Image (cartoon, grey):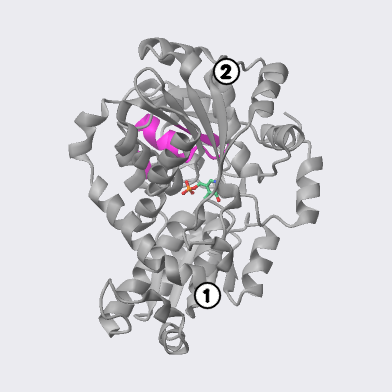
Amino acid sequence: MDIKQLTAEHPAVARIAAAEETVWINPGLQPFDSVRPTLPVSAADVADASARLRRFAPLIRTLFPETGDGIIESALTEIPRMKALLAEAYGADLGGGRLFLKRDSDLPVAGSVKARGGIYEVLKHSEELALESGLLSGCDDDYVKLASPRARAFFARYRVQVGSTGNLGVSIGIMSAALGYRAVVHMSADAKQWKKDYLRAHGVTVVEYAGDYGRAVEQGRAESDADPMSYFVDDENSVDLFLGYAVAAERLEKQLADNCVTVDEAHPLFVYVPCGVGGAPGGIAYGLKERYGDNVHVFFVEPTQAPCMLLGLATGLHNGICVQDVGLTGLTHADGLAVGRPSGFVGRVMEHLLSGEMTLADCKLYDYLRRLWESEGIFIEPSSCAAFQGVLDAARSAEMAAYIADHHLPMENATHVAWATGGRLVPPEQREIFLRTHLAP
Ligand SMILES: *Cc1c(COP(=O)(O)O)cnc(C)c1O
């Protein structure tokens, strides 16, 4: 990759390659109505995913009673003390706008946003196997049957495998093991030890790799492809994962309404989502655009050393470029975001939907983690904390001021949602360490 030439064509690359914090406004953003017909996914696909999750709810309730009604969902919490603190400590004043935290950090079963896409994909695969084999007679059958010893013995003949930086492995591993599959998670070097321990304690086989996430995926895929009884969850290209994430939008819509939040031309919605390979934030962004169109403004946030989606979007090369190509390490304390190459599928869907991206230095993750804990008593993991860089930049960057002016957005009526993507499963000792971690800027 010739960085000089890339930078000449795409000026944003200079800052990205220098690992400087960046606010990037997407020049490709277009009115959603003009983009919709060009997309490879549709509102009907998301509705289908949502209906499938409802069919599985009785089974989920049986396997995971903590889900209550069997619908895996998280709370939306207004965080006014954090809003005040951001204004006071960082000069990031949201004015009359309201600030919410979407707490996927507390999602049941997997404790991260991966409980949406990952679990959905395992369920969809299981439904296909069960319908084919006659375990289920049809989509109106009683899905609780899938928790029976007979069904478990059936699923035990199959393997489910995935490559993961941690949280995807937890979500796929826990759900697969709960159904009786032999689950294998291929983990990258930066995956946290406690996540590996947690999976092993739940009967999941964990294979560790010295290299990065890309390597773990490659090896996992090769091993799975060699076994006809094995199914590989492909985080880089999976449409099912994406649709599972997209269902978040209909749930958020209801929660916003419950909080008396209107979203329309006079009341813009801003959403900030930490981004790794792109599946989770991409699915969420797409789902929200289907619901709110041009009145929702979605921003992804990535670490300065692993801004793979930003690099792919800014150059238009998508998965044809990786962060190492421009001299970055791909290494970050945000283990859920430690991805060097973005999903090409997601990048192409985001091209004209995404409002922009922000990047942040790792030291900020821990600052935001402490601020949220001190102001609201809410703990989320470092990767999740990236969302707050989006909030800060929205309030105080020149790039965002220009975006807001261009789109004539009445910010006093705005609602901001920071998407907290993980945290519940972090062990108490590890939490203490995170709360005390200070990195040099
Ligand atoms: C996976 C993950 C993300 C990002 O999801 P991608 O699909 O990889 O983009 C964000 N935060 C946390 C905590 C995650 O585990």
Quadrant where the image shows the C terminus: top right
Percent coordinates x, y for residue 35 in the rendering: 23, 33
Instruction: Find disc 2 in the rendering and name its residue.
Output: 94
User: Which quadrant of the structure image shows residue 428?
Assistant: bottom right
Instruction: Find disc 1 in the rendering and name its residue.
Output: 178
Question: Which residue is at a point 32% across and 59% down the rendered structure image?
Answer: 51
User: Residue 52 vs residue 204: left or right?
Assistant: left
Comparing 304 with 125, the one in front is: 125
Q: CA distance from mark 2 to mark 1?
A: 44 Å
Q: Is residue 360 magenta?
A: no
Magenta region: 299-320
User: Residue 227 vs residue 81: left or right?
Assistant: left
Question: Which residue is at a point 50% across and 52% down the rendered structure image?
Answer: 73
- Asked if 224 appears above or below 120 in the picture, the reply is below
- Give SS at disc 1: helix
Comparing 129 with 145, the one in front is: 145
Mark 1: which amino acid?
Ala
Mark 2: which amino acid?
Leu
- Asked if 233 appears above or below 29 in the picture, the reply is below
